[in-house]
């Protein structure tokens, strides 16, 4: 009798161990557990840690709650100003409702990827080329809003969307290079003309000053001779102003004193 009782206890213990082994589940810290009992949602979402389910009745589905970094394949489109471009982006999103992410959509990652691609094509068609190149922050916000609106119903939240690269055709690159070169040349000519204007004003002031003070012209002539002589030239040809000859002629003439008159 005792042996039979011992056998029953061992059998029950073994069955209990097998049951616990079949029912025991461990949910990691970054996961949440969704239990389906006979195909229906059973209870609340299971928190991380050790949990138990009913074997052969319950099915535990683990949903990752980490932020997912998903690259969006390059999409080719025509901008509003009729330029063909290829644009790729990256989407950062995470699950905020594990039950909806499992039940409301078949594959939330695939759904977010397809929504991101179609939204990126739509953004390309609504934007100008200059906006894609220089106003990306605003386009990122609009793209994030377009993706996040339907994703909220799937239990998914889009944290950020970034446009990575904008590829242009080679002909457009050459055209933009010529445009940039022409713009730089225009600015250089404007700066040169402005410098010439300022220099002409200063030269006019200098000429007026020399006209009022004839001796300044002589000093300028001597400075020119010194500057040219510093180059160690063997021959120096210098125009001699007539005003200097007249000044020397007046200097050679004897000055009349009032007592001689």
Image: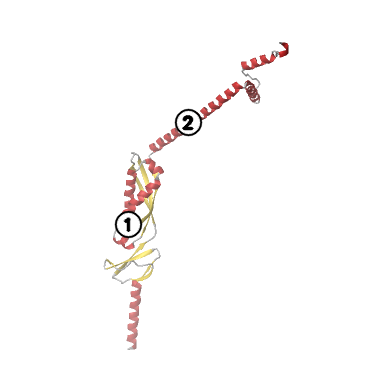
Relative vertical location of residue 70 with respect to residue 30 in this rendering, above or below: above
Question: Residue 122 at x, y = what percent?
Answer: 32, 46
Q: Which of pointers 1 and 2 lies earlier in the amino acid sequence? A: 1
Q: Is residue 204 left or right of residue 10?
A: right
Which residue occupies 33% across, 80% down?
Answer: 12
Specify few, some or many for label 2: CA neighbours under 10 Å numbering under 14, 14-19, or 20 or more: few
Element carrying mark 1: helix
Q: Looking at the rendering, which quadrant does residue 42 occupy?
A: bottom left
Q: Residue furthest right?
A: 259
Give the camera-side residue of 20 and 109. 109
Q: Looking at the rendering, which quadrant does residue 126 occupy?
A: top left
The Cα atoms of the two marked residues, 1 and 2, are separated by 55 Å
Q: Is residue 244 left or right of residue 189?
A: right
Residue 152's disc is 1
Residue assigned mark 2: 190
Q: Nearer the viewer, mark 1 or mark 2?
A: 2
């Amino acid at each position: 009798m005792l042996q039979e009782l011992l056998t029953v206890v061992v059998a029950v213990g073994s069955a209990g161990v097998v049951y616990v082994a079949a029912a025991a589940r461990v949910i990691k810290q970054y996961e949440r557990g969704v239990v389906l009992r006979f195909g229906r949602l059973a209870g609340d979402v299971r928190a991380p840690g050790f949990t138990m389910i009913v074997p052969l009745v319950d099915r535990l589905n683990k949903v990752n709650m980490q932020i997912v970094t998903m690259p969006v394949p390059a999409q080719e489109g025509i901008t509003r100003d009729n330029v063909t471009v290829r644009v790729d982006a990256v989407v950062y999103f995470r699950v905020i409702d594990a039950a909806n992410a499992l039940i409301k959509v078949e594959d939330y990652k695939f759904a977010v990827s397809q929504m991101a691609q179609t939204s990126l094509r739509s953004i390309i068609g609504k934007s100008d080329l200059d906006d894609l190149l220089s106003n990306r922050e605003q386009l990122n916000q609009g793209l994030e809003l377009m993706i996040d609106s339907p994703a909220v119903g799937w239990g998914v939240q889009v944290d950020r969307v970034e446009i990575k690269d904008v590829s242009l055709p080679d002909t457009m690159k050459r055209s933009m290079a010529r445009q940039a070169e022409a713009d730089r040349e225009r600015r250089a000519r404007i700066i040169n003309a402005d410098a010439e204007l300022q220099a002409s004003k200063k030269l006019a002031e200098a000429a007026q000053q020399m006209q009022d003070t004839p001796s300044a012209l002589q000093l300028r002539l001597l400075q020119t001779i010194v500057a040219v002589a510093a180059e160690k030239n063997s021959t120096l040809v210098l125009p001699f102003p007539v005003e200097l000859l007249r000044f020397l002629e007046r200097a050679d003439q004897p000055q009349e004193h009032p007592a001689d008159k």
